């Protein structure tokens, strides 16, 4: 079966996740925030595993940028 | 006079004057190999064993000093087995299985390679390059004594070349002055700075990595276990990496990343190097410096590895960073690929187009090596803040989370290239056949009642019949072919079935002289086999 990136809403508890994400960043300086987010990406990426899904996710994330950087 | 570019470790082929030098017209040779390193000598041995007359021209008279390449992979040893020179390499070499990765002073994880059972050769051995070359030349000497048409000329330096329609003219300098030669085919195995490439005005493009590495090979009497140790940001080399690896003769390879802006001359001073070594192995450990060198690296390739009657192999064609040991090991796969193709065209009348597939397959292999070694370099030498951010994130995680281990990249060890998509590949018609032996793959070894499988394959085309009926001697074929019949009854460990049959009860594999799979079926069909061979050697040879 071909796995596809889930882009329809899929959160069990979206507000709870968002609050947990913010709470994890409390008290961190900018470098620590970057480091935390990098680790988080790697943890989630391993959970997903599927290379096509991961690449699709990178594409979606890049496409959503509001700053002109690409 | 022939310039001396480096010192030799072993003098193996001193200059001798030969009749060609006084010939009134230039003597024509079927194959001339320029460069007597491991690639040139390996190719000479392969061709000579196949009865193809070949001449090696080397501008020195032996093997260069310094350990240089030290990791030789299983596939290289299998190729050397086919060439007849692997035993002394494995006898002399160091086999290791445990690796430890450190960050700062802490061990963040260790691994055991636990090589798959049922292979004659280990995953790899550590062996100084001069020994590797010496063992090849010693086998050449034995083959010469048995009549193999190989000639080596030391201190013969090619100074000019001119490619004609059907041959190449060479101008050669010697201690007795210059002479000319002609070659039907020329193979340049003259290293990363290939003079042949320069004489032909051909480009060598790629990426230069802004980093320096110091190699210190030392002799010490210490109880370090035979392991590979790799450090990120150790106290003795802050902010950089370091590597410790065992070689034969009580020699250890120490490798220190130095960064880009260094005072090269100062870093090469023995006192400075000794200071670094002591900081790494302990101030109380006595040692002796055997060989030191600072290297920078680049990943480069030529656009084409064949130019008419001239071929490029080894570092002359492609250069990679040392991570993953893909230089010499990649070059030996070039030898493996080109030897039988030249022999098929020269001795057996195969189509010239077969020689084009050398470029096709080995460029594919080289690009795979360049991709892998570039990725390692990006991990070890982060080039921008994002590289550093994710590298550090991986290292932070790996101490506590095993899932991050596959992301740590201190080198992806050389593996045989599978020529997926090669024009030489025939049918893959074995239902759900094991992927590891699909057409294009180097055959997996397997232990059989009759000995290891790979010892029974190669050198010529081989039909491997596993519980399948194959008539003895395939009539009407000009291609010399061996038939190897094996049965599930010979396969006590089940490795053959797992690696070659899958769920099938029989299989027929057409295997090329370099032990790569050309095509496979469930049962023998003479017409299909003939078609696959024709696809490789061309229309006239079948």
Image (spheres, rainbow, N blue to C red):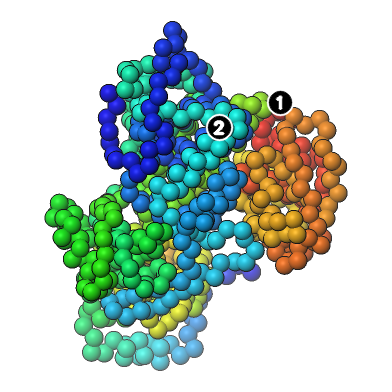
Q: Is residue B28 above or below residue B401?
A: above
The label nearer to you, 1 versus 2, is: 2
Residue B363 seen by the camera: no
Q: B534 and B485: which one is in front? A: B485
Q: Which residue appears at 35% of the width and 33% of the height? A: B60
Residue B152 pos. (x, y %): 46, 30
**Picture coordinates of residue B183, whole percent (x, y):** 48, 21
For disc 1, the marked residue is B540
**Element at label 1:** loop
CB under 8 Å between discs 1 and 2: no
B350 to the left or right of B323: right
Residue that label 2 marks = B144
CA distance for labels 1 and 2 = 32 Å
Q: Earlier in the sequence, mark 1 or mark 2?
A: 2
The residue shown at (32%, 80%) is: B106
Residue at 35 percent of width and 51 percent of height: B67
Given residues B333 and B146, the one toward you in this image is: B146
Task: Describe the element under mark 2 as helix, strand or loop.
Answer: helix
The reply to whether residue B244 is in sight is: yes
Tell me which residue sits at (41%, 49%) in the image.
B129
Parent chain of label 2: B
Image position of B19 (left or right of A21)? right
Q: Quadrant of the N terminus of chain A?
A: bottom right
> In the shown orientation, is residue B46 left or right of residue B504?
left
How far across and down, in percent of the image, does residue B330 sit? 47, 48
Crowding near the residue tagged with mark 1, few <14, some 14–19, many ≥20 C-alpha atoms within 10 Å:
few
């Amino acid at each position: 079966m071909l796995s596809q990136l889930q882009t329809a809403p899929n959160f069990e508890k979206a507000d709870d996740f968002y609050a947990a994400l913010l709470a994890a960043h409390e008290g961190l300086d900018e470098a620590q925030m970057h480091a935390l987010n990098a680790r988080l990406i790697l943890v989630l990426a391993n959970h997903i595993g599927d290379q096509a899904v991961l690449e699709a996710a990178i594409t979606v994330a890049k496409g959503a940028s509001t700053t002109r950087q690409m | 006079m022939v310039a001396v570019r480096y010192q030799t470790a072993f003098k193996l082929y001193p200059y001798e004057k030969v009749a060609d030098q006084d010939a009134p017209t230039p003597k024509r040779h079927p194959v001339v190999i320029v460069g007597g390193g491991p690639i040139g000598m390996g190719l000479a041995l392969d061709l000579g064993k196949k009865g193809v007359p070949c001449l090696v021209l080397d501008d020195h008279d032996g093997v260069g000093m310094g350990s240089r390449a030290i990791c030789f992979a299983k596939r290289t040893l299998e190729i050397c087995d086919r060439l007849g020179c692997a035993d002394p390499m494995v006898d002399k070499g160091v086999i290791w299985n445990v690796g430890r990765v450190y960050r700062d002073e802490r061990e963040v994880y260790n691994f055991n390679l636990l090589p798959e059972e049922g292979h004659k050769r280990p995953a790899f051995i550590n062996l100084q390059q001069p020994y590797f070359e010496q063992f090849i030349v010693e086998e050449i000497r034995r083959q010469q004594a048995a009549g193999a048409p190989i000639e080596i000329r030391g201190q013969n330096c090619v100074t000019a070349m001119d490619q004609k329609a059907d041959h190449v003219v060479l101008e050669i300098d010697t201690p007795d002055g210059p002479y000319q030669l002609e070659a039907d085919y020329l193979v340049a195995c003259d290293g990363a700075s290939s003079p042949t490439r320069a004489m032909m005005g051909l480009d060598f493009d790629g990426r230069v990595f802004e980093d320096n590495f110091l190699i210190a090979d030392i002799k010490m009497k210490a109880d370090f276990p035979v392991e590979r140790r790799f450090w990120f940001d150790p106290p003795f080399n802050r902010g950089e990496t370091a590597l410790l690896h065992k070689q034969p003769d009580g020699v250890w390879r120490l490798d220190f990343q130095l960064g880009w802006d260094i005072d090269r001359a100062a870093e090469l001073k023995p006192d400075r190097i000794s200071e670094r070594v002591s900081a790494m192995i302990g101030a109380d450990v006595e040692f002796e410096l055997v060989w030191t060198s600072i290297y920078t690296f680049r990943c480069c390739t030529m656009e084409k590895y064949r130019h008419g009657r001239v071929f490029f192999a080894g570092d002359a064609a492609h250069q990679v960073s040392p991570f993953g040991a893909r230089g010499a090991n990649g070059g030996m796969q070039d030898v493996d690929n080109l030897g039988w193709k030249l022999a098929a065209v020269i001795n057996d009348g195969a189509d010239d187009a077969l020689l084009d597939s050398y470029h096709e397959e080995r460029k594919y292999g080289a690009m795979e090596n360049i991709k892998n070694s570039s990725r390692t370099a990006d991990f070890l030498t982060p080039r921008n803040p994002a590289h550093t951010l994710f590298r550090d994130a991986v290292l932070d995680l790996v101490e506590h989370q095993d899932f991050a281990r596959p992301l740590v990249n201190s080198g992806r060890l050389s593996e045989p290239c599978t020529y997926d998509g090669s024009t030489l590949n025939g049918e893959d018609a074995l239902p759900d056949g094991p992927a590891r032996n699909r057409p294009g793959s180097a055959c997996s070894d397997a232990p059989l009642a009759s000995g290891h499988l790979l010892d029974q394959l190669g050198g010529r085309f081989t039909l491997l019949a596993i519980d399948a009926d194959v008539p003895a001697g395939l009539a009407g074929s000009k291609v010399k072919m061996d038939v190897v019949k094996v049965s599930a009854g010979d396969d006590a460990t089940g490795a053959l079935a797992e690696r070659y049959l899958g769920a099938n009860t029989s299989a027929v594999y057409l295997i090329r002289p370099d032990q790569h799979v050309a095509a496979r079926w469930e049962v023998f069909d003479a017409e299909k086999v003939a078609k696959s061979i024709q696809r490789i050697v061309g229309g006239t040879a079948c």
